[in-house]
Image (cartoon, grey):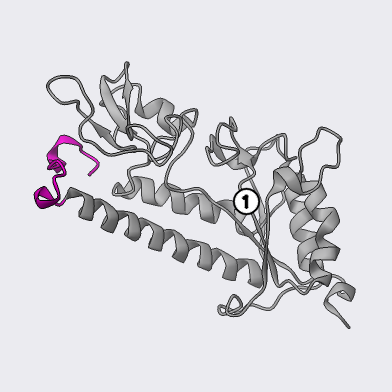
Amino acid sequence: MTKTETTGAILTADKDWWRGAVIYQIYPRSFQDTNGDGIGDLKGITARLPHVAALGADAIWISPFFTSPMRDFGYDVSNYTDVDPIFGTLKDFDLLIAEAHRLGLRVMIDLVLSHTSDQHAWFVESRSSRSNAKADWYVWADSKPDGTPPNNWLSIFGGSAWAWDPTRLQYYLHNFLTSQPDLNLHNPQVQEALLAVERSGWSVASTASASTPSTSISMTESCATTRRLHRSAATLRLRRRSIRTTIRNISTTRTGRRTWNSSSASAL
């Protein structure tokens, strides 16, 4: 029996499944549109899974499809626990998982953990004051005496990596768009919140509808393996960011760069 003939298959737990695996990346927006709005969706991915399986793929990797204002095409997440309406619903994701497993395909999703949208509830609270419960969940810093940004760091998209917030009267760090504030990954609460997202059901088959906040989870051994991989990957990303920040904080006067005083920003 070939992979495409498998019915009701349950993937065997294997922590090393990814070694040598063929992983097919899917960008939802341009993959397959099923409702005629010109934007690809989760139902479109599900419809094409038999073809992907027939190609010999072992897994699919889906680019972000979470709730987002789409200023960076989904990489600015405003809600980690729901599907953006342009891509479908949580029920559509359930069906995608079920069909993938029936065909012997594992499913990986692209969680954006270094930053959120400025519309995310975490940032809305963080920017509201310097004393709220999430005040230290993002990278905030005071301005220089003349009101300019804390240092000369640049955004990957160009311009300063710091944006002024008139409510909090501080700058916040954004390595990408100004609408993508960087999370403070040195904060243990942030680390746990992100790992909770990975444990919440995206790594398994959620059975909740888009209108149901509480999500019940149907877990198979294969999904548990995927969850462990996601958690390990998240930990590695957190450590990598910590190393990058440490390097940035070292004075490099011999190269002519400005010295960064880490005490100016509570998050660094």
Residue in front for this viewpoint, 78 or 219: 78
Q: Quadrant of the N terminus?
A: bottom right
Residue that appears at 46% across and 63% down = 233
Q: Can residue 184 be seen in this view?
A: yes
Please provide percent x and percent y for residue 15. Answer: 56, 78
Please provide percent x and percent y for residue 241. Answer: 33, 54
Q: How crowded is mark 1: few (under 14 residues within 10 Å), some or many (20 or more)?
A: some
Is residue 173 shown left or right of residue 57?
A: left
Displayed quadrant of residue 19: bottom right
Residue at the far front: name it. 255
Q: Mark 1 points at which residue?
A: 63
Displayed quadrant of residue 49: bottom right
Q: Does the magenta stretch include residue 111?
A: no
Please provide percent x and percent y for residue 54. Answer: 84, 71
Q: In which quarter of the image is the C terminus?
A: top left
Q: Can residue 251 be seen in this view?
A: no
Displayed quadrant of residue 29: top right
Residue that appears at 23% across and 36% down = 152
Residue that appears at 54% across and 51% down = 111
Please provide percent x and percent y for residue 201. Answer: 61, 53
Count how many numbered circles sit on residues in the image: 1
Residue at the far left: name it. 254
Q: Which amino acid does label 1 sit on?
A: Ser
Residue at the far top: name it. 166
Secondary structure under badge 1?
loop
Vertical arrangement, residue 221 with respect to residue 110, above or below: below
Residue in front for this viewpoint, 241 or 151: 151
Vertical arrangement, residue 12 with respect to residue 158, above or below: below
The magenta span reads: 250-268
The secondary structure that dominates the magenta segment is loop
Is residue 1 shown left or right of residue 69?
A: right
